[in-house]
Amino acid sequence: DAKTTQPNSMESNEEEPVHLPCNHSTISGTDYIHWYRQLPSQGPEYVIHGLTSNVNNRMASLAIAEDRKSSTLILHRATLRDAAVYYCILRKTGANNLFFGTGTRLTVIP
Amino acid sequence: GAGVSQSPSNKVTEKGKDVELRCDPISGHTALYWYRQSLGQGLEFLIYFQGNSAPDKSGLPSDRFSAERTGGSVSTLTIQRTQQEDSAVYLCASSLSVGQGTYEQYFGPGTRLTVT
């Protein structure tokens, strides 16, 4: 499975935008880019996913590079509740399995 | 609506004993997954059930691990002759199948297993 690379940790001030990067240079044309997050002591929760075009939903935006070798999860206004580990995952078309890496631990500073 | 539920929430067992962990998926979800998360680590895929198809067991770490899904709903993960390295949080997730056009997995709260 294609690998993703994320920074181990990031910090953001409350109410500021946050840009969480992910590199996936070996992505194939049929791989979807998924983001999940895991709040402390909880199971992961879905954030967003995309294939080629940028995506927006109520939680976040996903910006995908034109060559698809990297993507950025954008939280428009960080809140304390957004403090979590964020996982960038590639999923092959037709496959349901997700292979989680170690993710980025986001700390939100009040 | 009701989410994915798991029981027990915590389980402490002695090395060498067998344990069973239960997962109740969201009603109508045909796909069910088991993962485990060791302390400070990311999630490790274990097994995946899709409808009536044979499960994908490629992530099971040894033959001491097995899982069943009865009636296409509830699933039980069994660990035989538990070892200390089995200590982890075991997470269950469910989703609609690929054919139904959505891939979001919904996770339960997990079962924390401690082997002493």
Image (cartoon, rainbow, N blue to C red):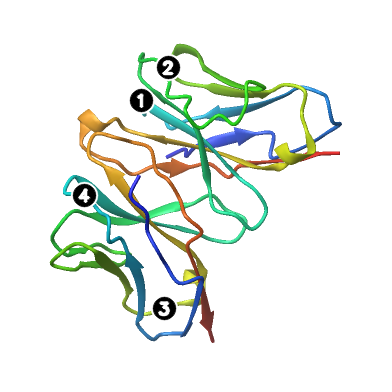
Which mark lies nearer to you, 2 or 4? 4
Q: Quadrant of residue A61?
A: bottom left
Q: Secondary structure at mark 3?
A: loop
Kindly check if marks 2 and 1 are in contact, taking CB atoms under 8 A apart as contact: yes
- Which residue is label 2 attached to? B72
Kindly check if marks 3 and 4 are in contact, taking CB atoms under 8 A apart as contact: no
The first of marks 3 and 4 along the sequence is 4
Q: Secondary structure at mark 2?
A: helix
User: Which label number is shown at residue B18?
Assistant: none
Query: Residue under mark 3: which chain is it in?
Result: A
- Three-letter residue code for mark 3: Ala
- Which residue is label 1 attached to? B30
- Which residue is label 4 attached to? A28
User: Which label number is shown at residue A78?
Assistant: 3
- Three-letter residue code for mark 2: Gly
Question: In this picture, is B43 found above or below A24?
Answer: above
Q: Secondary structure at mark 4?
A: loop
